[in-house]
Image (cartoon, rainbow, N blue to C red):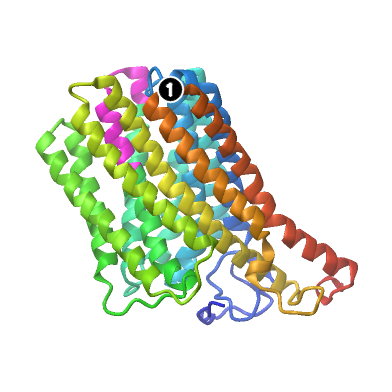
Amino acid sequence: MTTLPPANLGTTPGKSLGGWDGRPPGLPSAIPPPSVPLTFLLASAFGLVACGAFLIWARNFAIVDPTNDHVVATAHLAMLATLSMGVLGALHQFTPVITIRPLRSIKISRATFLCWLLGAWLLPIGFATTIESIVEAGGFFAGLAVFLLVVNITPALRAKGKGAPVTGLRLAVIGFVITACYGIVYVVDRRGNWFDLNGRVVLAHAIIGMFGWLGLSYVSVAEKLWPMFLLAHVPGRRRSSWVAIWAIAGGVVLISPALLFNLVWLAWIGAAVLAVGLGAHLYSLLMHVLHRRRKADLHLLFVVTSAFSLIASVGLALGATLIMSSHHHLGVALSSCMVGAIGGWLLIAYIGHLHKVVPFILWSVLRGKGIKEKSDKTQLMFADLYNHQVAFFDYILVTSGICAVCIGLAGSFSILLLIGGILLIATGLTVPLNLSVPTLRFLKQAKDTGAPAFDK
């Protein structure tokens, strides 16, 4: 079991920062109440369900024109309502853990959630219905959520000497702000048409969102989670983590303006730098896997599969670039497949880590209520808070769904997009159920047996 750093911010037991009654001993007082990250994580599951449903609806448009508004709406549900929602929840949980500094305000955290929830859903709905007022409202709330996040998380990210993960999170938040600025300009342009909003320009925006925000966030947090979840101690100074963070950020800085101003030579340089960063990330994962002390388990399977999806996306990007000029439709299909593979890299890793992170959060809730043992009087562990067979089924669902979507986009197979959408819906429904039902059962048992936590 992971040893947590001691609480050292001077809060008193029982009630501490953010009004969390009964905080378990030893849990840093900088960590927000469980309801803060869990609301983001639960909302991301609903986002995945909606993404699958929209994919089914937009499948015939996707095989003809991947830039169609229906497909754009589906992509935004994936990137905003699912992945970004989940990453925001992770940031609210792990930034205080990594830095041992609290967020500015729990109320701002909740306001961030509500604003991002509105923005992440209104934007896709507006794109799908072509109602510009809905798009503009979604852009407003999304921009407000980004502003609130920056205000709230800045005090924690000011921590000095916390290594590559904190540096990466700082850069990721900057990437989030830039992505939002791009998005606001695009929302305005949909009505004003004051510059040429073509596919190349939109891709400049997408590169920052996928790698400068979501990718950097995952790479940064993973450098803290892998040692814990794999029980791995990589000897040496671990320069690969620094190379990954700076090279990914540097590659994005080069590629995005290169696409924006159609500078092909600069785009190739940026792509090479980004490839170095992603390679360093994969090398760091390999070192953690080789030096792990925990036996191969489902979490490792999720993480390794995610890495293969990233490798596939690099190959697809190269293939699309080389083919685009001579076979435009195939090049566009491979480009959309590449975006699906990048989404698969992040989604598979995200769901895999959820099976470690959510039990950790819920375990602290149970400990705070005095629930420390199972019915057989053995110690309650993280692994007791979800069904492992269902978790493996979720692995099959999400990986099969990503494969179906990618092959369907690359080969213009509508039936595979239908299957992929159904599998993603099933994933979005079963994961939160599997991660919540055991905890609810423990709470009910404790209440029925008159555990001390319920003696009032």
Disc 1 target residue: 62
The foreground one among 138 and 418 is 418
> Is residue 30 in view?
yes
Q: Is residue 245 left or right of residue 28?
A: left
Q: Quadrant of residue 428?
A: top right
- Tell me where residue 443 sits by quadrant: bottom right
Left or right relative to 219: residue 351 = right
Circle 1 SS class: helix
Q: Is residue 133 visible?
A: no
**Which residue is drawn at the image coordinates 81% and 76% (left, top)?**
376
Query: Where 302 falls versus 55 (above or below)?
Result: below
Magenta region = 187-209
> x and y percent of residue 370 in the render?
76, 76
Is 80 included in the stretch rendered in magenta?
no
Q: Give above or below for 36 relative to 237.
A: above
Q: Quadrant of the C terminus?
A: bottom right
Residue 72 place in picture, x, y as percent = 43, 27
Residue nearest the observer in this picture, 227 or 293? 293
**Depth check: 71 or 322 in front?**
322
- Image position of 77 with respect to 415: above or below: below
Q: Amino acid at mark 1?
A: Ala
- Residue at the farthest left position: 265
Above or below — where is 456 with respect to 334? below
Image quarter where the N terminus lies is bottom right
Question: Dot 1, crowdedness within 10 Å: few (<14), some or many (≥20)?
Answer: many
Quadrant of residue 364 within the rendered picture: bottom right
In the image, residue 103 lies at what x, y percent?
Answer: 49, 63
Give the residue at x 54% y 60%. 298
Depth check, front residue: 117 or 239 = 239
How far across and how far down the image is residue 419, in percent? 55, 31
Residue found 31% across the figure and 32% down from its top: 335
